[in-house]
Amino acid sequence: MKDKDTREPINLILKAILHADGGSRGNPGESGIGYSLEADDIDGVRSTISYGGWYLGQATNNQAEYHALIWGLENALVLNVRTIEILLDSELVVKQLNGEYKVKNAGIKPLHQLATQLLTRFYSASISHVERSLNSDSDKLANAAMDSASPVGGFHVEYVSPDLLAAANIEASSPVIPPAPQTPGAPAGKEAFGESDSKDSLRQEKTDAERKAIMASGMYYLHIKEHFDAAHALIGYDGECKNLHGHTWDVEAEVKGSELDVVGIVYDFKDLKEDLKTILKQFDHKYLNEVPPFDTFNATAENLARVVYEQLAAVLPAGISVVEIAVWESPIARLVFRLE
């Protein structure tokens, strides 16, 4: 007969594998997060030790991805995980945390900082990208939370958002908590005589809700201006501009976003200036007709504005979009490209 196992339970987990995923239906829109933690027991049998899904409310896809990772890390720390292997299907989050991508989005920077701080609390941590099909369990948990607008699963610690969505003027949904009943012996007031301030409270709640709705739908617009010097010739143009001539081109860029970081910035002017300057640098003091993509079509102000628009849109972080690009050929000649 085998002796009874009298070993004390192990209160720490040497290594665990974390899968995490977040999603947004609308980007930004209704969002949810999910995670699952796996570990091997003393006999080498792998099983899920913690899992869950949480409804966030309004958020972007990238925000949800970070929130999912943060929640998974918090549960791993509660379970005394020492070494963690993290598998995510968000290439952006993986490359940002591994230092391959710079974090530019104002709404992501605080989340990135918090995730980085949590990672330092493990003896060791690794982060790798996997295909979405290999991250299906956490994806299902995130979707289940979105479908029910409530928590799901067997998590060990509830998720407490670091108030970043509120800082971005986007507030997660939460139940309304009714006021506590009047306690015996309390000073007489309206409640003591069967009256209440419920109408005033409801009126205030409605006012707050309306205010938050307005703020959540608000938009911030940034406008900057740079210039460069370049020459061009308009092929096929019937006029003097068919000959080689030059301009000091002034280029204005306007972008928009709705999410503020904890400092209250939607996108740093310094970063936006650097983005535009990098694009214009390829044209500065050049003969535009020989610079791609103008070696395949005319270097008109119209095409220049469109090209700058496309290139700027490609480098801006999630949540920030181009409104318009304006090109000045002279102090009195301005052309604008925008998407209608």
Image: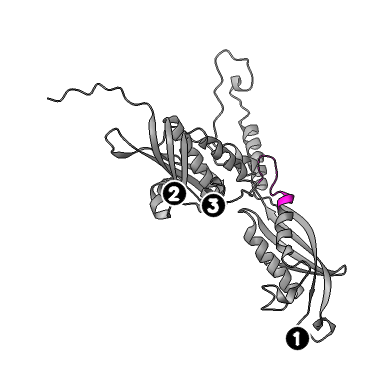
- Residue 58 image point, x, y percent: 56, 47
* Image quadrant where one finds the C terminus: bottom right
Q: Look at the image and name its color scheme.
A: one colour
128 displayed left or right of 248: left
* Image quadrant where one finds the N terminus: top left
Looking at the rendered image, the disc whose residue lies closer to the viewer, 2 or 3, is: 3
Amino acid type, callout 3:
Leu
Asked if the magenta segment contains residue 133, the reply would be no
Q: Report the residue at 61% width, 48% height from top.
A: 103
Q: How far, Cα to Cα, is label 1 from label 2?
A: 56 Å
Q: Residues within 10 Å of mark 2 (few under 14, many from 20)?
A: many
Mark 3 or mark 1, which has the lower sequence index? 3
- Residue 257 image point, x, y percent: 67, 52
Amino acid type, callout 2:
Asn
Q: Report the residue at 79% width, 68% height from top.
A: 285
> Depth check: 316 or 195 in front?
316
Q: Residues within 10 Å of mark 1 (few under 14, many from 20)?
A: few
Residue at numbered disc 3: 92
- Residue 258 image point, x, y percent: 66, 50
Amino acid type, callout 1:
Gly
Q: Is residue 19 above or below residue 252?
A: above
Please provide the residue range marked out in magenta: 260-271
Which quadrant holds residue 50?
top left
Mark 2 or mark 3, which has the lower sequence index? 3
Q: Which mark is residue 236?
A: 1
104 displayed left or right of 79: right
Residue at numbered disc 2: 143
Asked if the magenta segment contains residue 263, the reply would be yes
